[in-house]
């Protein structure tokens, strides 16, 4: 590692009570966005399973929220949970799910984006808490959507758990009539991500009942195409309407010509909707 970074890490570690190499996370600053292949690995940081307790302590340390946004230590929890995911640290599941389920009020975009992926990396040990929480969801709170996404992440990253995760999400979607259409839309999207063709009877029932928000994954024909159950639409697609008040809604670009971008645009709209719901209170680690 960079000697200057390590010198800074030692200084911050002494200030906040963390030894090396865990203290190194205090000096790294803003993390890279994107999938785990862009994250700094635990091995690069010289972290191993023996450091898991200190990583959990750092991740849950509330002092980082009181720091100026310019402090590199503000991002230490993000690096901590990414390292815990890389280490497949099942001991961290209670703390990680506490962050995820408590995020409706805290509104930390790093939590809603990263923690489902981290739980997916850790695997099957996270399923019971996620299934229990999702089972009680009826509305479209971000924590409910994140619980569904976390289960899908486990199924995508651990093939041996794929069928179990599909069954959990299917069972939840069966209650579509008593659930918010946006929650049902995200359940459908997660089943599509799992390539769950076996879920199509449940998905069709939800769409036919008018229980699915079609702005999230498209309509039933879109879903059937994504699942490989049909080659093309048999009815004209509804035009995607861009909200004039949405500064991010720029419409399809010339680069999109010649390919079907409706599903991609719908997903982006849904992500903006979720982000708007979570931004009730801004935090210093919020993505800008």
Image (spheres, helix red, strand yellow):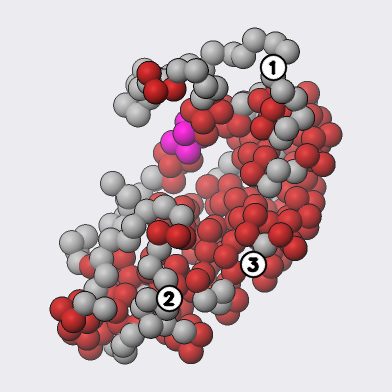
Q: Residue at x 56, y 51 (%)?
A: 146
Q: Is 167 located above or below residue 125 in the figure? A: above
Q: Nearer the viewer, residue 9 or 60?
A: 9
Mark 3 = which residue? 123
Q: Residue at x 56, y 74 (%)?
A: 88
- Residue 270 highlighted magenta (yes or no): yes
User: Mark 3 or mark 1, which has the lower sequence index?
Assistant: 3
Q: Which mark is residue 127?
A: none
Q: Nearer the viewer, residue 207 or 221?
A: 221
Q: Is residue 15 visible?
A: no
**Could you tell me how far apart the alpha carbons at marks 2 and 1 are, in whole angstroms?**
46 Å
**Could you tell me how far apart the alpha carbons at marks 2 and 3 are, in whole angstroms?**
17 Å
Q: Is residue 86 visible?
A: yes
Q: Residues within 10 Å of mark 1 (few under 14, many from 20)?
A: few
**Could you tell me how far apart the alpha carbons at marks 3 and 1 are, in whole angstroms?**
36 Å
Mark 2 = which residue? 42
Q: Position of residue 90 (x, y in %)?
A: 60, 76
- Residue 256 highlighted magenta (yes or no): no
Q: Nearer the viewer, residue 50 or 14?
A: 50
Q: Residue at x 64, y 10 (%)?
A: 236
Q: Position of residue 253 (x, y in %)?
A: 38, 21
Q: Position of residue 35 (x, y in %)?
A: 46, 55
Q: In the orientation shown, which residue stands out farthest toward the front?
A: 258
Q: Residues within 10 Å of mark 3 (few under 14, many from 20)?
A: many
Mark 1 = which residue? 233
Question: SS of the residue at dot 1?
Answer: loop
Q: In the picture, which quadrant includes the N terminus?
A: bottom left
Residue numbers of the magenta segment? 268-272
């Amino acid at each position: 590692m960079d000697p200057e970074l390590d010198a800074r890490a030692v200084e911050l570690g002494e200030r906040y009570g963390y030894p090396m190499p865990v203290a190194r996370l205090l000096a790294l600053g803003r993390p890279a966005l994107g999938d785990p292949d862009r994250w700094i690995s635990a091995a690069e940081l010289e972290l191993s399973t023996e450091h898991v307790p200190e990583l959990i302590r750092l991740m849950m340390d509330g002092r980082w929220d009181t720091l100026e946004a310019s402090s590199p230590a503000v991002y230490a929890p993000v690096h901590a949970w990414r390292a815990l995911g890389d280490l497949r640290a099942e001991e961290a599941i209670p703390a990680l799910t506490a962050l995820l389920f408590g995020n409706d009020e805290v509104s930390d975009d790093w939590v809603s984006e990263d923690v489902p992926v981290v739980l997916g990396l850790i695997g099957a040990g996270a399923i019971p808490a996620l299934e229990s929480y999702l089972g009680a969801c009826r509305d479209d709170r971000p924590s409910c959507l994140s619980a569904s996404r976390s289960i899908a992440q486990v199924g995508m990253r651990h093939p041996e758990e794929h069928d179990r995760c599909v069954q959990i999400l299917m069972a939840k979607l069966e209650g579509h009539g008593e659930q918010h259409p946006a929650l049902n839309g995200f359940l459908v999207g997660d089943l599509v991500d799992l390539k769950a063709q076996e879920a199509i009877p449940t998905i069709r029932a939800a769409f036919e009942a008018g229980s699915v928000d079609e702005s999230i994954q498209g309509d039933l024909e879109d879903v059937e195409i994504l699942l490989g159950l049909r080659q093309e639409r048999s009815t004209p697609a509804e035009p995607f309407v861009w909200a004039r008040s949405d500064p991010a809604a720029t419409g399809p670009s010339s680069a999109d010509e010649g390919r079907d971008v409706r599903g991609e645009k719908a997903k982006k709209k849904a992500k903006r909707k979720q982000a708007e719901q979570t931004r009730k209170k801004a935090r210093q680690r919020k993505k800008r």
